Amino acid sequence: MANTEISFVRTEMLQEQAPPALNVGLVGWVRGNLFPDVLSGILTVVALYLIYSLLSGLLPWVFGGVWNAGSLSECREIIAAAHGEGAEAACWAVIHERFWQLMYGFYPDHLYWRPNLALVLLFAAIAPVLFEGAPRKMFWITAASPFIIPWLLWGGTVWVPIMAAMGFVIGYFVYKLVAQVSSNLLGLIAGPLALVIWWLFLSSYASSGLASVIPLELEPVASRKFGGFMLAILLGVTGISMSFPIGIVLALGRQSNLVIIKALCVGFIEFIRGVPLITLLFVAQVMLSYFLPAGTDFDIILRVMIMITLFASAYMAEVIRGGLAALPTGQYEGADSLGLDYWQAQRLIIMPQALKISIPGIVSTFIGLFKDTTLVSIISLSDPIGWVKFIQANAEWNGIVWELYGFVAFVFFLFCFGMSRYSMYLERKLKTGH
Amino acid sequence: MTTLTDPPQESFRLSMLLYDSRYRSMTIQVIVMILFMLGAAWLINNVIINFADAGKTFSFGFLGQSADYDISQRLIEYSSVSTHGRAAVVGVLNTLLVAVMGCIAATVIGVFVGILRLSNNWIVSRLAAVYVESLRNVPVLLWIVLTMAIVAEALPTPIMFRGGEATMSLFDTVVVSNRGIFIPRLVPSSYGLLLIPVIIASLFGLRLLGKRANRIQEKTGNRPSTLLASIGIVVVPAVVVFFGLSAISSNNQQVFVTSGVGEIGSVSDLAESEKRISYCHASGSAASLNGLRHLEELGITFKRKNYFNISAAETALATGKCGLMATSQSGSEQVVQRVSSQVKDGVIVSSFAGEFTEGRAMEIEFPVVTQKGIAKFEGGTHLRNSLIALWLALSLYTAAFIAEIVRAGILAVSHGQTEAANALGLRSGKTLRLVVLPQAMRVIFPPLISQYLNLTKNSSLAIAVGYMDVTGTLGGITLNQTGREMETLLLLMAVYLVISLTVSTAMNAYNERTKLKER
Amino acid sequence: MNWHTIGPTERVTHAGGMKMGTNVPGSRCSTQRMYQEEVIMNKSVFFGALTVAGLAAVAASAGTLDDVKARGKLNCGVSTGLVGFAAPDASGRWAGFDVTICRAVAAAVLGDQDAVEFVPTTGKTRFTALASGEVDLLARNTTWTLSRDVDLKFTFIGVNYYDGQGFMAPKALGISSAKELDGATVCIQTGTTTELNLADFFRANNISYEPVPIETNAEAQQQYLAGACDVFTTDASGLAATRAAFESPGDHVLLPEIISKEPLGPLVRHGDNEWGDIVRWTLNALISAEELGITSANLAELSAGTNNPEVNRILGSEGNMGEMLGLDAAWAARAIAVGGNYAEVFETNIGENTPIGLSRGLNALWTDGGLIYSPPFR
């Protein structure tokens, strides 16, 4: 039906109107995000109340704390004088007094630069792995740091790490030689064998010989002196970096179609993942010495490192297996079609991709391992929690609880939160990479 | 591996072990196997030599020796005269208990927080994010220690309940104190357990009802209301059976059994002959509970001694640790016989009518605070402080991980699904329940299993709060007392390994069954 | 399975011409080596790419004394922290009653009281640490019992503190005896003989209790103060030390019952008697010093020689006691110089003028009605 009685036809558009005041700005945001409906509104109120009650209790305690006092009783007196009798406030003086011990343990304080430098080196070493923008030459630092960092931490003559690094060079040459003379497989056996022989029997003579000729050394520090967060980081980093190659081997073994190798790898991985870390630490503490020939006696920190490495490698293997599984079959088939053999395919095609996919998983394994290093306090190592116990055993600080645990928890939070954010960023970056 | 066509008549040469791909893998495996065996033999040989040097032996005989220490929380009967083996079993059960409780709580909290994290409400989602980040970025050992400290500091002590400074929760039925939580306990009479099959049958009926409703809905499109019928199916049979059984048991006369130097005829006789009656209370026995109430009604002062079960109470009666226990008339003959067989010469075991009955089919025992002596709670089921702290810490910690898994699972469900559900007119709650979660479950399930296993393994940190799990008993005090590190630790690892492997096998089987069948 | 049937392989090493069948886990035989710390650091084996000097091949040989001398350090096991007995102070230096014993031994053997590597051990790990040779001496308030002596194969070289397990309760609880503890919740510090004594005590007295085993003293203390347990039980010295740290110590009482005997003392491994003798006589020297009035103040003066032959024998100006032990003449003087005689060590670390405030009690000299007694230096 045609409508001929239109009295008004708009010829120009209306000006855009501002949205209703209730839907924009702060009010709009609050309405949209906090009170969109009744249920949500109630939740908001409950949440606000929760936040209020938590902060109103916590903030005065934290910020009303005492920073300078020699003992807990002195702290209590200061607090009573400042806030009145019976008032509750934190006694941060204990952190003030013992901060460096919580960070470095018994490490000699004139040598703090060494762990600090080691940490900087560590960052430089992982930079090319984590940041694509980093110059490729930095891989030299990555290759050298496993030898420099322990030397910095433990000290001693410089020849020990150099001779240890020599082991790899020797191993490589032996491999090349044997591989040329006979088969590749024999080379693969002979190379590592030469490496082990060099390390176990020859390198110590070489390094002590060289040390007597050219004595270049740092002041030695026994591993007993390591403690606090330095120990936690050291255990975490050692565990992850040493478990990395073992994890790759285990992951490949688990995927292999060689029955016996697969069974051994699966058995190892499932065993380690099936028992709690604390039982493995007990093993390190009380059982490991029975498994080794009479005469070898490892320092407890080294024993714990070995156990943590074994523990981490089982988890690492699963992460890498996840990365391998995430690769499309086409990549394997492509490698086969190029005529690459197993190791070439792994080295050139599979591993670079699988490891890249695994990085976020590796970071979260590291976070988990770093947190788990607190368990070493149960077997009397002086990690941050171990130090909390030491400090509590001083007559001056006997009876202090919340400040110490709170501080340790806070520092752990800073480390782990930072790393988990970073891992998320990596994950996003990798996602867009495809 | 693709094999090239081999020349037909090739004889075997030794070098083929290395160069022929058919044999090479075999060679590698044999070498690896030999190396592995050599390694294992080397380790075992070292152990044998070191053990001989240290004059140690390897034997599990210590499991049969008396443990000599007490464990507060025990799901089976245990005392300090029990064996180390039994202590280990108590520990295993405690581990399983906290693991199961923790998994359930962690799942509930985790799913809840995971959903809240995706809420449109800004402050709620932020709060959920803060929860997740703060929990999972701090070591679980610290959380356990902190939770224990908070539980101990924040909750009222028993003495406060006596003075009226603190009161029980939920209409005076539940005690929340820093000794733990006490909840009312159901105590069935001798026939009371018959209620259980009835309730199971009712639940079965409920399922049939639901199936019928589904059928009708499929046929007609309308779902009949099943609410009234469901209530009827659950309540009516239970109530009828309860009153029926109660009618029988409230006619069951009960008797008291006592041991002492003289023949005793009534409670008042006993009260006269001894300065204070000590009453053997067997937890979970209706006769014991009613006897206790009867004594209270009589207004006789007595001392209550709690025992784990009836046989423990009988032994205590026989050894004179307590003087009076209640039992049903029908079973009193056997009780007297059993007790008499254990007593010393000259002690007379006698029984007399108690003038009270077995009461209702299912009695409820409420916790109360003692008025005399050291303030403590009696009656009810005791969830200990250490259990509560460990349970809370483990489930809150694991919940943070589960929340992330749930969030990832929900986000993995394509947005089209939600939109389609919205287009069908489903509300957001129903969308989540009927459309999103069932699909997300497939993504959630595998990592969820590994979180359950992590929780179980983390429960080994129970020693930090004094909860006697298997690490605390077998790997703790037993190891310390016997000095048998090798045996206890091997056994301890075996226990965890069996738990882990069982759970992961069962869960994987379930996962396999519910997996989306793809090409 | 019983591996003992395989037959113990006897290992024989020669030490100074003496044949010594070592049946001791710690004394691993191996070739004699140069024992300089530096060399040990150099000998460390590289494991993988990462670790180094931790692997100091502890090549124990003839005897612990030689090992210690060669190493230049005494490895001494202490507790992971017990107020007054062992704890690192603000500068990271270990101090305490047990620690002083370690230092005295180091001073006697090595001439330097700081030549000690303190190894913190828990109740669980202490015996393994000693048995495996990780420590040369365990000074960690350990109770001398038959099974530890015979079954675990350790030699207790004496008693440096006579203790006993007691109870602490808040005054508000209104009890005056442990026998009134029926139904009480008891916090126990585990890893020791404590839980066994407790179980025995309550069983013997036919009273029920609720044990709350707790790993560390600090946590047990916190639980007790929060009222999560009615009483706290551990060694009486520990109770006194704990109470001293309370905000209001007066609100808590120590119950009169001491339910066990806890003779605490340093211990060494079985089988190395020379080493045991050195530790034993170092402790005895401290005790005798108190008896004879040798203090850190008059030590220098008395070392020059006195009219009392026994003082002279101890301090080395007469006789050859040091030589007999394989040490030099001034060994005991150095040990005493560390923290003074037994009384001084007691007073500085746990005595009445310290926050811990323990009285001598049983630990007074025998001449003052206590049990502390040293055999004569003759």
Image: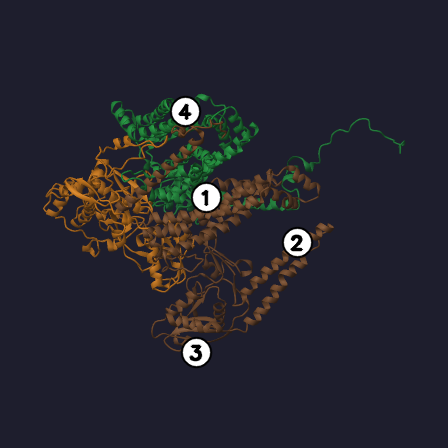
Q: Nearer the viewer, mark 2 or mark 4?
A: 2
How far apart marks 4 and 1 lie (CA) works out to: 35 Å
Residue A278 vertical placement versus B184 (above, below) = above
Q: Secondary structure at mark 2?
A: helix
Amino acid type of the residue tagged 2 in the rendering: Lys
Q: Position of residue A82 (x, y in %)?
A: 43, 44
Q: Colour of chain A?
A: green
Which of the two discs, 2 and 1, labels the residue nearer the N terminus?
1
Residues packed near mark 3 inside 10 Å, few (<14), some (14 to 19) or many (20 plus):
some
Whether residue A305 is visible, yes or no, is no
Q: Position of residue B171 (x, y in %)?
A: 56, 60
Q: Nearer the viewer, mark 2 or mark 3?
A: 2
Q: Which residue is mark 4?
A: A141
Q: Position of residue A101 (x, y in %)?
A: 36, 37
How far apart marks 2 and 1 lie (CA) works out to: 44 Å
Label 1 with label 3: CB-CB less than 8 Å: no
Q: Which residue is mark 3?
A: B265
How far apart marks 2 and 3 lie (CA) works out to: 60 Å
Residue at point 53% right, 40% down?
Answer: B130
Chain given the colour brown: B
Label 4 with label 1: CB-CB less than 8 Å: no
Give the letter of the chain under mark 4: A
Do the dots labelled 2 and 4 sit on one chain? no
Q: Which residue is mark 2?
A: B211
How far apart marks 1 and 3 lie (CA) works out to: 60 Å
Q: Colour of chain C?
A: orange
Amino acid type of the residue tagged 4 in the rendering: Ile
Label 2 with label 4: CB-CB less than 8 Å: no
Residue A320 vertical placement versus C136 (above, below) = above
Q: Which residue is mark 1?
A: B140
